[in-house]
Image: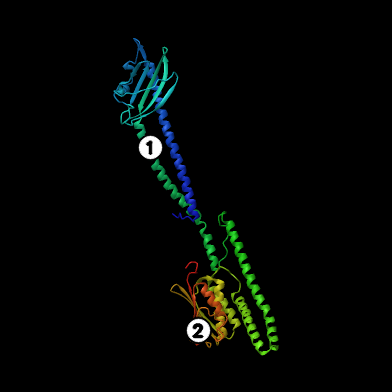
Amino acid sequence: MNLESGSLRGQLARRLLFALVLAFGIGLVLLDISIRHLTSDFVNGRLEHDADNLIAALEQKDGQWQIPPERQATVYQRVLSGHYFIIKAGNQTLSSRSLWDSLINIENIDQGKQRSGLLQSDHSNTGVPDDQSWQWYAVGIVIDEQPITVWLAEDISDIQHSVHKLRYQALLFVAVTLLILMLWQWRILQCSFARLNPIREQIRQLRFGEALPTTHAAPAEVRPLISEIHRLLQQLEKRVSRSRNALGNLAHDMKRPIQQLQLLSRNLPVDIQREQTQALTNLQQLVERELKRARIAGVSSPGRHFNLNEELPALIQVLQRIYPDTSLDSQYPADGVMPQDRDDLLELIGNLLDNACKYGKGKVYLKITNKQQQWHIEVDDNGAGIEAELRHKLLQRGQRLDESSDIEGSGLGLAICRDIADSYHGKLQLSKSALGGLAVSVILPCQPPEQA
């Protein structure tokens, strides 16, 4: 049973269990009190009845009170029978034979008064045998103007044993019932929370590009949450799209002023013109970078996984239109879904392919495989490539790939690709391609960094 502290199901189960235990506990206490009062009232009623019979049989002879033996019940004549009486009239005391040699001190009771209580065998001088427990009843009467106290007692040890047995049976019943109710409660909670599983699955499918979860089949309690998720996802998508469009528009609008500055720089002295041209070239590269990102990524879908069969054909088609003279072949699992963000991988693979098409000589090959709990992305071209010494320099920490002036053809996109790979705890490697040019390999874990 799932009872972890952070679980809503666990909290509900604990609270319902507490309520059940409290309810059954209160019920047991009330039941015990009721049984004790019931047995006490029952015994007291019987003692009152016996007291009336004794009072009716009481007679005075030669100035002494007596009860004829034939008018006494046999239980009072049998030693330690469990039924006893004492009648106290002035200095005279009558007691049943059943008391034998037990000495019981009783108090005088005023006329019309009644008292009751319990005498336990506690190894003190109560006169009660060790194996008995007496419930007593006393009443004060007046006969022939003489006050008389009638005291009766009954052994209730058998009743107490029965009550104890009933307590144990009640505890066992409560324990079994509580266990059954706990299992039933767990089953009810499991079935209730099972209604949320389709919603959870639909939300998970959002990362694979599926539709937003619907609210008509959801419980009423979670419909506002689903509606809020709808609103937040739509708002996030609009914000990302606006930001991307704004960057693309800004980069596009900056192209003409940069070109004008490049024309004006020709009128400057040669040394200043060189510095000005380099600065404008760097700025032009930044503009091209943003335009390339907007062109490759397409419509923003934040939070989605990268479905190879859905995303790659459209990306390859865009690049084929940009580079019509390049043959772009690919190989990847049709049912593959990479756990990284869809927009990040579009930018990563798009930049790799864009660089390969730009600096290759008409032939580019893309291969994506899943092996040893890792995704391998390999892009080969038949261009000039990069010498081994320079490739090693490019992979040194702190050396940006697009800032190495002595490496021709490295491409601006490689810097973006390495940043994306690093953000997912992956790595980017450069080597010589079997096609004769540069081979770029990116290795990404099969689990995103928050789950790895």
Callout 2, which amino acid? Arg
Classify the position of the N terminus by image quarter.
bottom left
Q: Measured along the vertical axis of the image, is residue 350 above or below residue 65? A: below
Residue 400 position by quadrant: bottom right
Foreground disc of the pair 1, 2: 2
User: In x, y percent, where is residue 307?
Assistant: 53, 72
> Is residue 215 visible to the viewer in this orientation of the structure?
no
Q: In the displayed image of the protein, which residue is found farthest to the top?
A: 62
Question: In terms of depth relative to the viewer, which is nearer, 217 or 442?
Answer: 442
Q: Write the residue at 64% across / 83% down.
A: 279
Callout 1, which amino acid? Leu
Q: Is residue 1 left or right of residue 216?
A: left
Question: In terms of depth relative to the viewer, which is nearer, 287 or 162?
Answer: 287
Look at the numbered disc 2 and give the secondary structure of its residue: helix
Q: Tell me the crowding category of disc 1: few under 14, some 14 to 19, or many 20 or more residues within 10 angstroms, Cα based.
A: some
Image mark for residue 316: none
Image mark for residue 391: 2
User: In x, y percent, where is residue 81?
Assistant: 31, 26
Q: Write the residue at 67% across / 82% down.
A: 258
> Is residue 151 visible to the viewer in this orientation of the structure?
yes
Which of disc 2 and disc 1 is earlier in sequence?
1
Q: Which residue is mark 1?
A: 166
User: In x, y percent, where is residue 70?
Assistant: 32, 17
Q: Write the residue at 62% across / 65% down.
A: 235
Q: In the displayed image of the protein, which residue is found farthest to the bottom?
A: 270
Question: In terms of depth relative to the viewer, which is nearer, 152 or 405?
Answer: 405
Look at the numbered disc 1 and give the secondary structure of its residue: helix
Q: Write the residue at 70% across / 86% down.
A: 264
Q: Is residue 447 left or right of residue 52?
A: right
Mark 1 vs mark 2, CA separation in Å: 88 Å
